[in-house]
Amino acid sequence: MTARRPFRALPALLLAGLLALTACSADPQPAPPPDPAPPTEAATTPTRVVAGVDDLGPGFNPHLRSDQSTVTTAIAAMALPSVFRPDAEGVLQLDRTVATDAKVTSQEPFTVSYELDVEAGWSTGAPIAAEDFVYLWQQMRSQPNTIGSAGYREITDVRSRAAGKAVDVVFDEPYPHWKELFTNLLPAHLLKDAPGGWTAPFRGGVPASGGPFRLMQVDRLRGEVLLVRNDPYWDTPAVVDEVILRRIPPNTLPTALESQGIDLALPDARPAVTQALDVLAGSPKPPTVQSGPRPSVQQLSFRTQDGPLADPRVREGVAASLDRDAIRERVSPDSTAVDAFGLAPSDAGYAPTAPDGAPGRPDRAGAEAALTEAGYVRGADGRWSLGGRPLNVVIGAGTERSEDVEIARVVAEQLTAAGIGATVVAPATPDLLTSASVAPTTPTPTSTPAPGAGAAPGGDAPQPTPEQPTPQESTPTTSATPTTTPGDGGSVAVDVLVAPRSAYGAIGPRLVSDYGCPPDDVPDDLPGTSCFPALQPLLDQLLTGPADPAVVAEAERVLWRQLPALPLYQNRGLVISNPQTDASTRVTPGPIATGPMTGAKTWGEPEGSSEAVSTNEAGEPEN
């Protein structure tokens, strides 16, 4: 028995030792922290797609003529909600991420009812709701400088149901084009009570997002717009973290594409770009170049209310003095001539409606006959005058829109050669399109706007909410500030306005929006407004009924006779991409109304594009 005691004592000794070790470890020395894991590429470098563009444009409200640009269209496609969106064939389809249903629910009165997705909301946390419909309707029916306002003016009421998640829109009479309405909804909760809310917040960004991306920053000095994935987005999130729209001069385009400083480019088709692409034509992997029409037509609008062009014979004489083909060749030789007021060359069924001679074609004899009939005489110096007063017209183009300014210069040259005095002014684009008279600012060699150019008096952007910072806009350190020249009263009325008009949508609303009589609450002396008793009944038929070809043809005849405007051309846009971008995005020109960025939510990052994280404006790596 005694021989087994040592064996029993061993566990006791071991237990005592363990207890002693436990006691010693009750207050241990702190161990050194583990080495941090090396950061992964995904953690340090966001995935992105970089798209080169010609310029940023003056602003980003997609409903304003003054803000029309490739960048504005891209931002709207990625960040703003629409009830209906065009498919690949351009046919409007219900966007079920915004509305689960939209249909006509009554004929008397004509009513369209929308059931909104209960999860659909703005990046601020506010729901996308009936108030956004009300806000857009109220602004579109009463504000100048809008695109496609005619349909909104047919609405008599917008009613909210289901705590704002259902909307009934009531029309004055049956409106067959209702699916075109309520695209690119805007955040009413931020804009409706903000001074200048319709315009001011959009000069430096978009206040909130209701799409897969949100606009984070506009840097005009670097020429960049940054959009990031909208984390509160309720549907399938975007694949890439960022999309950057970067200004790229044509001469740096080959370097930017080859170095993947940009993944694709979206310039207008023009000789400088074509010449730049020739550099890449012989490379082992040349870029893919696709072409598509731009969603607007360049045109000249005449002031018909008063001034020298109030006389239709003078308008005819001015139009007959202009060589539209020469203007196009000088400014945009790769564009397509436009010879109709309603349909554009990109529209199915487009056909020229211009008469064989003046004013559809330059006709010096016709111009002289029209001006002589209006009472003008041509002096020994070749100048036209009436009662000893020379015929002079003021041509206006937005200072931020370099193409418009160049058109104005060429028009002035042609009119001067024809004996008609012409002065070009280039105020801020929003001022030009919303004011009866503007400061007589002379155009400058560059289109870069001065800091704050075009700000509405007293118009400030709404204050950001805690959930969504307001996009920041960097102020350029250099700019081409227009020089103001003295004039009577310090302002001038514009007789010939250079500005785009839309080139998509049903022809009836398009014609009424562009050439119909303005409603009572819109000033009738603004540039681009007109009202002809012989034309309005025809436009009314086209707005609320089918597009009867005979009615369209008669409306075109009246427009060529009355000449509220003179159409010029429709630009073509290019989509230039490298093989890596093609594989990850399958980018196309997209539907005309929404453009190449339509499918950006599903795009992946092109292979190797992380090398383009730090680049300069030319797309070249920065040291």
Image (cartoon, rainbow, N blue to C red):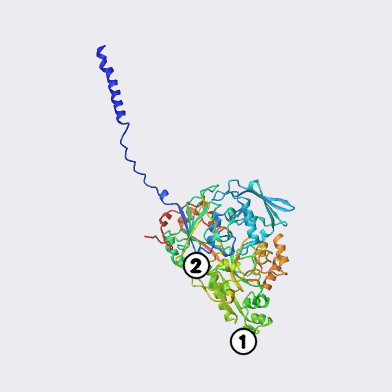
Q: Secondary structure at mark 1?
A: loop
Task: Specify whether 79 is left or right of 342.
Answer: left
Side of 427 where 30 appears, left or right: left
Q: Nearer the viewer, mark 1 or mark 2?
A: 2
Q: Extreme right residue here?
A: 108
Q: CA distance from mark 1 to mark 2?
A: 41 Å
Q: Position of residue 160 (x, y in %)?
A: 66, 49
Q: Is residue 316 above or below residue 179?
A: below
One can see residue 357 in this view: no
Which quadrant does the C terminus fall into? bottom left
- N-terminal label among 1 and 2: 1
Q: Secondary structure at mark 2?
A: loop
> Crowdedness of circle 2 by 10 Å Cα count: few (<14), some, many (20+)?
some
Residue that protrudes farthest toward the bottom in the picture: 380
Between 429 and 562, the one nearer to me in the picture? 429
Q: Which mark is residue 379?
A: 1
For residue 450, the mark is 2
> Which quadrant would the N terminus be assigned to in this image?
top left
Q: Write the residue at 57% across / 49% down.
A: 126
In this rendered view, identify the residue nearer to me: 4 or 546: 4
Rendered image quadrant of residue 85: bottom right
Q: In the rendered view, would you say 346 is above or below 302?
A: above
Q: Is residue 99 above or below residue 250?
A: above
Q: In the image, what residue type sits under mark 1? A: Gly
Report x, y in % for residue 314.
65, 78
Q: Position of residue 38 (x, y in %)?
A: 36, 46
